[in-house]
Amino acid sequence: MFNSTTLEVAIGLALIYLLLSLFCTAINEAIAGFLGSRARNLEKGIQSLFTEGKANQVNTDGATNKALSLADAIYNHGLIQSLYRSGSGSVAERDVKNLPSYIPSRVFASALLDIVFPDNKANPTGLPKTLSEMLDKLKLLPESKGKDAIMTLVLQANGDIVKTRQAFEHWFDDGMDRAAGWYKRKTQFVLFCLGFIIACTLNVDSITVGSTLWATPALRSYSIAVAEKDAKEHSLQPSGPGAAVAAGAPQAAAQNTHTDTDNSGLNDRLSDPSADLDKLQSLNLPIGWGTSSAPWLYKGHSDPWHWVGLLFALIGWLLTGIAVTLGAPFWFDALNQFMVIRSTIKPREKSEVEPSKN
């Protein structure tokens, strides 16, 4: 069971990790936007659905062109191109920075139905209405694992075009859940690297900070006051006894791949990441480079305590990097839960120190 000191130290550390996570998330968002990481991840996810499957391209006069990969056919479809930021969606001219980072499952299903059941002016039959008609058109696709997957979904729908559309939507959602895992792992690695680099640069040593908070009640009280103020400013206070309201995560993973929740609370804070560093510096904790925050640095290299201090600093930086990897949403939630626990144990602690009546 937490005592008051342990809980207050946890609150102070959670606040620090939250501020660093927000700063690292802002940097990661900028990198992802510049490199088009979400769009790349979405494209990779769609390619994995079809596993190199191809589709025959049919002209309006009924002539068949060279087969195009199903993934490229999806991106070349008018419904998908309407989601592009700008530029052409042709295979030769496609720029990953212009690709959509979000495709609704219903749009994907409509585009795929149009691709696998093509219509043209020479033979305007529209979507097939029976299972046999669907299978006849699917047999025209080049052999691939993607074709097998599509045919399996159509067979399961038993010729019902509505169920077929729904099957395509569910298939797409399942594939995007898998792609979300790829993006999340990549994002966590990037956040760890950023967190470790910033921890080393600013000397945010979790061990030194934690021990200082433990030994200095004034710093603990000030950190808690800052945490409470931050919670009120950003509407992070728990909504009821024992409940913590977690503000959602920013767009840390590919939109459309279900790694993101609705996270408007954090998105508002990513516009000015320097404010989080300013707040971190205002805590007056042993952060940065000085005799109090890095005493080992000022010892002679021949002094064995110099190397011991450096080793503990490296461990502290590593712990900070790992904490940042958990992400700002985690620390939002953890900070609020700690606040709830503290609010419930404080009255009990006060009652324990009341003098006995004689």
Image: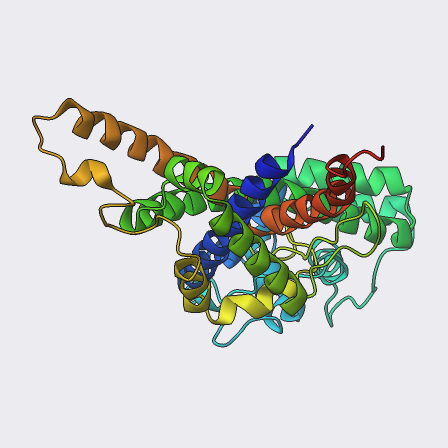
Quadrant of the image occupied by residue 64: bottom right
Q: Identify the residue at the far top of this view.
A: 304
On-image quarter of the N terminus: top right
On the picture, is 195 further left or further right than 344?
A: left
Q: Nearer the viewer, residue 141 or 165?
A: 165
Q: Quadrant of the C terminus?
A: top right
- In the image shown, does 325 or 14 lie closer to the viewer? 14
Q: How many marks?
A: 0
Q: Is residue 354 above or below residue 269?
A: above
Residue 192 in percent (x, y) is at 42, 42
For the point 64% across and 66% down, which residue is it? 234
Position of 248 compared to 132: left or right? left
Residue 298: x percent and y percent? 14, 40
Q: How is the image coloured?
A: rainbow
Q: Is residue 14 above or below residue 118?
A: above
User: 48 or 232, which is in the foreground?
Assistant: 232
At 40% from the left and 46% from the top, the residue drawn is 195
User: Which residue appears at 67% of the width and 40% of the height?
Assistant: 147
Residue extending farthest front:
358
Residue 133: percent from the left, percent from the top?
Answer: 85, 49
Residue 57 visible, this angle: no
Question: Does the image show residue 127?
Answer: yes
> In the displayed structure, does residue 168 sit left or right of residue 61?
right
345 relative to 168, above or below: above
Residue 144, percent across and down?
A: 61, 37
User: Front-most of 101 and 314?
Assistant: 314
